[in-house]
Image: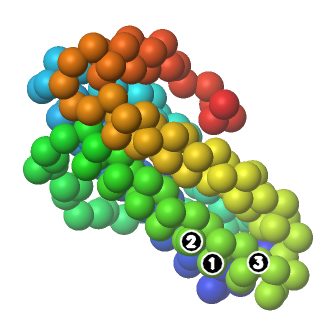
Amino acid sequence: MLSEKLLAKLNEQITHEFYSAHYYLAMAAYFKKEDLDGFANFFIVQAEEERFHAMKFFNFIYDQGEEAVITGFKDPRRDFKSAEEIFTLALEHEQLVSSLINDLMAIALEEKHYPSISFLQWFIDEQVEEEATMGKLLNQVKRVGEEGHGILMLDRELAARSFTPEGE
Ligand code: FEO
């Protein structure tokens, strides 16, 4: 049994996660346009991960005997100018998501709702990974710059990423 407050916040998180998928797909579209297919692949895989996150919330709500409420969201931004800008925005976005997950955990702890605490712990750990990945790639993009051999090497590396359900 979930409190009204916790249920509402868990439902909101479904929307945040699907929005994240859309946001990352918009970033993938920028890289497609730039013929950087490896970077595009990275964000397409990231979008898949976000949909997987959304569905974890969706399923958890039903496992708790409640109902999910599916709502819409705003258009994601798509006026990107560079890889550095994109990774800066992606890192900021993950930091925002981390704060949302932390807020959810704070409610679960306050309510001593142990199933939610256990469920949310996976997301707390996942966010550490997500922030670290975006931060590392931002630094690498800054180091190699937007033109030349370095960015193409990085592009080749990112082409190898594939979706693994537990976000490895
Ligand atoms: Fe679902 Fe990237 O956080």
Residue 164 x, y percent position in the rendering: 62, 25
Image mark for residue 103:
1
Answer above or below: position of 80 versus 76: above
Question: Is residue 168 visible in the rendered structure shown here?
Answer: yes
Q: Residue at x 80, y 87 (%)?
A: 110
Residue to which mark 2 is pinned: 99
Q: Residue at x 76, y 77 (%)?
A: 108
Q: How far apart are marks 3 and 1 (CA)?
A: 9 Å
1 displayed left or right of 11: right
Which image quadrant: the N terminus?
A: bottom right
Give the image quarter of residue 140.
top left
Q: Do residues under tags 1 and 2 come within 8 Å of each other at their CB atoms?
A: yes
- Calculate the distance from the C-alpha at mark 2 to the C-alpha at mark 3: 14 Å
The residue depicted at 78 percent of the width and 59 percent of the height is 121
What kind of residue is marked 1?
A: Asp
Ligand 1 is within 8 Å of the C-beta of the residue at disc 2:
no
Q: Is residue 41 placed above or below 111 in the rendered structure?
A: above
Indicate the secondary structure of the residue bearing disc 1.
helix
SS category of the residue bearing label 2: helix
Question: Badge 3 is on which residue?
Answer: 108
